[in-house]
Amino acid sequence: MDRIMETAIEADPKLPIIRITRDFAATPEQLFRAHTDPALFAQWAGPDRLTTRIEHWDARTGGSWRYVAVDGDAEYWFHGCFHEVRQDRIVQTFTFEGEPDGVTLETQTLEDLGDGRTRLHAQSLVDSFEGRDAILRSGMEVGVDEGYAKLERMIIDGAV
């Protein structure tokens, strides 16, 4: 299968949450590995124009992470903590160091659809509707769409 899937991004009208849903032609184990293996994560995370460099990555319950997204001479640093890491669910914080007060709580669950297909459910909870809407206005959908398209190609190519 070489068809790139669609990503749904929705803002909850009652809570400051962004929900992302995407189906992959991959097993839950493949998607879990892509989200927890730093070498794999660095290859697909974010928009095409950026390069991701991992500084620290300890993908376990109680672990932490930090990476930089490089865009030419500009660097954008991010960090967080892994609160729960298990085969079907990852809960972590996410902070863009340029906005250190904007901590997001992210939950990703992997729903096994059978036949080598998995639905990724991601939820990002922020502290205000203003913060949520600023994230949506930032162009985050480009990074999500392009990143997941890269991940899908890696799966098709057998890299994951």
Image (spheres, rainbow, N blue to C red):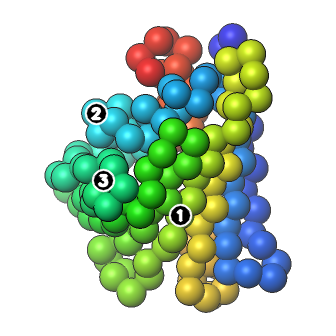
- Mark 3 or 1, closer to the camera: 1
Name the amino acid type tagged 1.
Answer: Glu
Find numbered disc 1 in the image and state the secondary structure of the residue it sits on. Answer: strand
**Which residue is drawn at the image coordinates 76% and 29% (left, top)?**
113
Q: Considering the image in quadrants, where does the N terminus appear?
A: top right
7 horizontally vs 157: left or right: right
Can residue 20 be seen from the camera position used here? Answer: yes
Vertical comparison of 150 with 13: above or below: above
**x and y percent of residue 103 in the render?**
43, 78
Which residue appears at 30% of the width and 53% of the height?
A: 69
Q: Position of residue 153 (x, y in %)?
A: 53, 22
- For badge 3, the amino acid type reads Ala
Of residues 31 and 76, the one nearer the viewer is 31
Q: Dot 3, crowdedness within 10 Å: few (<14), some or many (≥20)? A: many
The front one of 147 and 73 is 147
Q: Residues within 10 Å of mark 1 (few under 14, many from 20)?
A: many
| Tag count | 3
Q: Is residue 5 above or below residue 127?
A: above
Frontmost residue, 71 versus 44:
44
- 66 displayed left or right of 11: left
* Residue 140 place in picture, x, y as percent: 55, 60
Circles 3, 1 touching at the beta carbon (< 8 Å):
no
Which residue matches tag 1?
106
Residue 139: tell me if it is visible.
no
- What SS does tag 2 mark? helix
N-term-proximal mark, 3 vs 1: 3
Which residue occupies 70% across, 31% down? Answer: 112
> Which residue is the site of mark 3?
69
Q: Which residue is mark 2?
A: 39
- Mark 2: which amino acid? Ala
Q: Label 3 to label 1, Cα distance in Å?
A: 19 Å
